[in-house]
Amino acid sequence: MSWTRKILRVNLSKGSCTSEPLNMEWAKQYLGQRGLASKYLSEEIDPKCDALGPDNKLIMATGPLTGTMASTAGRYSVICKSPLTGAIACSNSGGFLGAELKFAGWDMIIFEGKSEKPVYLLVQDDKVELRDASHLWGKTVWETDDILHQTHQDPQLRVACVGRTAENGCLYAAIVNDKHRAAGRSGVGTVMASKNLKAVAVRGTQGVGNLEDAKTFMAAVDAGKGVLAENAVTGQGLPAYGTQVLMNVINGVGALPARNMRDVGFEGAENISAEAMAEPRASDGKPNLTTNAGCFSCTIACGRISTVDKTHFSVKDKPQYHGASGGLEYEAAWALGADTGIDDLDALTYVNFLCNEDGFDPITYGATVAAAMEMFEEGVITTKETGGIELKFGNTEAFVAVTEALVANEGFGPDLALGSKRLCEKYGRPELSMTVKGQEFPAYDPRGIQGMGLTYATSNRGACHLRSYTVSSEVLGLPIKTEMGDAEGKPELVKAFQDVTALVDSAGLCIFTTFAWGMDNIAPQIDAACEGDWSVEGCMEAGERIWNMERMFNTAAGFTGKDDNLPPRLMKEAIKSGPTEGQVSRLDEMLPQYYQIRGWTEDGTVTKETQQRLSL
Amino acid sequence: MQKSLHIDPGKCTGCLQCEMACSYEHTGTFNPSRSFIKVFTFHDEGRFAPYTCTQCDEAWCMRACPVDAISIDASTGAKVVSDDKCVGCKVCTIACPFGTINYAQTTGKVVKCDLCGGDPQCAAACPTDAITYIDADWTGYDRMMASAAKSLPSAETTAG
């Protein structure tokens, strides 16, 4: 089993909370979390609906392994239609909330409608109620978390909530749980706030049991943990350096974009790398990194807990930022740093704290500032718009100032809250938005790493590295080495990574396990826990089914093959220097092959035959 | 040889594998709320600390129990609660100076670490060796060795 087989449906318009049985027929096809919740969303909403209207739904979903002892099995996902992209959104988060929801006896919560007044949902096992949240509206994530813990006098309570940016309509607001883990991308927090839902507070005491075959499960889990411990990336690199281990690596191979992807290669990379985070600083002799931390059940523990130098200008007079909190991950360090041309580690850590404190996606935010900086340098945006701030690449003080303006919803903040696509359109330079389907790129240049170009172009939630992380193969050589400059073979590679990822995201596991685990490590854990066919083949087919279902949602929402593109800069402006000099993305070669392998038409529509083959 | 749980908070990542292993061993479910070992997170300090019963020789809980429900497991030295005898009076929870014996609403009895009969599952599950099960006489061994290493004269000095 391991599913609780129960769904909590919360109608915010009516103020009702009802329990209903999980559709087990769907569970056996879509597993859980990303896959299963996307199935519910596809069945229950009109893909053309207004993402910020009451017709959109927001689903918080666990996987069947969430809350078990399988390594990393603490994940949950938030699924809805995205206000940033108009496509299906699925943002995955770690921390402890997902497992707690499972312990309370729920596989997922479906929020529908819109509350008249701000409310929060309190879940204590079977006891579920919507409570007034007027006193929480206008509070930060950190304040909300603290207040709810004080109110309920329960140190074990787990809280997921939105901050002020979501309330203010910032299109890339996140849902933050456990203070610094986030369902970060695609504006899922904006959708939550649009429903006047401030927080979800959960306490579960029922545990997860009734595994299909407990003995086999524990043996598979132990074997899996052993594989993670012995692998160089999951056993050593990630615990010691976090994802930031990549900063110098990706810069070294010539794939670290800089300054709104105008350049590739960042001269300040070393100053904002994992190695820099471990260096004792002059003021107090302590390094930026306090410790690594694990999410629920995770034996990798890549999480960063950091402090900002108390003497740094950004926090000098702000003691509330002097404690330890969630530190820089690679994508955040890149977007906030390399993409803006800033190599001040303390400033980036402070801005990262603000991203957690008020719940907004550091990738989209950093990339949006980068686009604004380019337009500022070209004179399209001036100090008149920025409120006197010299928003040039590399200007740390300016970056800190506009971030505080975003949080306060003042000055240039509301412009930055639009995301880069709408911002660049507003100022007449749409080509400067480094996005696919309206969502900003993460930290790998698709001109340098060809597979990532196809990954970004075809990702169902807009540009994203977490839909098929072919960097693993193209740079790190896991599970097999492919050449990052080659376009040949990449359509097959991308498809395989996409399908595996879709399945892992539906199980309750973290995608970082796949640096070490293949499907032959993952499938036995799912199969022992769950009813149904979860052999390697069964898992791969479910992954493919989930991918195609998401694609069909987007097609119904109005997307076509024309939206599987990259900005002209990445197709036409060759990399100017370094090991990848002269390269552009060869998406044009890869895309038709990809469609063919997927069993889609030439314009990227899922064919009837493919739908039948996958029982869609 | 008597063995003890040895906890090194500096190695803990807060993953709760120990809580799940404990609850699975004792209840057959993954359920941190029923674990006898707890991991505490000190958020602002960026610190984690697993904590459980240290199995005192002169155990306050055992002395306080009015119905002799707590006894010593001769093979491990663990103080073990007998569910048949425990009446749920909670006097032991008042007596324990460390808070590591607690009442469980689900059963109406008190619960505490029993060292899993000599094979503590928390230690087996810990991925970073923050929890180990070692010779009770030498729980300070690693720290003692680290201090000894610091006291060594440098190689250059001794070479002459």
Image: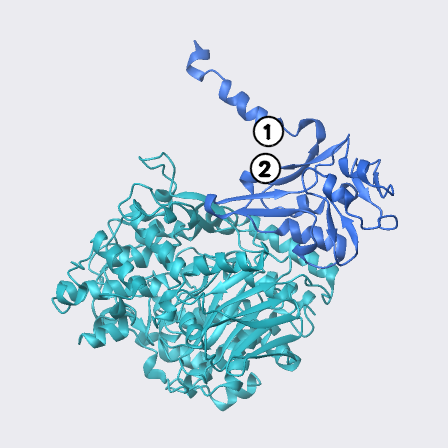
Between A243 and A76, the one nearer to me in the picture: A76
Query: Which mark, residue A139?
Result: none
Q: Is residue A558 above or below residue A170?
A: below
What's the residue at 74%, 51% (across, down)? B103
Mark 1 crowd level (few <14, some 14–19, many ≥20, 10 Å Cα):
few
Between A139 and A423, the one nearer to me in the picture: A139
- Pointer 1: what residue? B142
**Tag 1's secondary structure?**
helix
Labels 1 and 2 share a subunit: yes
Q: Please give the chain letter of the residue carrying mark 2.
A: B
Q: Residue furthest top?
A: B160
In the figure, what tint was chain B given?
A: blue
What's the residue at 36%, 36% (across, down)? A280
Mark 2 crowd level (few <14, some 14–19, many ≥20, 10 Å Cα):
some
Indicate left or right for A59 with A487 as reference. right
Q: Are marks 1 and 2 in contact (CB under 8 Å)?
A: yes
Indicate left or right for A478 with A249 as reference. right
Q: Identity of the amino acid at label 2?
A: Asp
- Pointer 2: what residue? B8
Q: Please give the chain letter of the residue carrying mark 1.
A: B
Indicate left or right for A126 with B45 as reference. right
Quadrant of the snapshot with the C terminus of chain A: bottom right
Q: CA distance from mark 1 to mark 2?
A: 10 Å
Q: Earlier in the sequence, mark 1 or mark 2?
A: 2
Question: Residue A444 appears at what percent x and percent y?
Answer: 34, 61
**Tag 2's secondary structure?**
loop
Residue A442 in view in this figure: no
In the figure, what tint was chain A given?
A: cyan
Question: Residue A120 appears at what percent x and percent y?
Answer: 51, 70
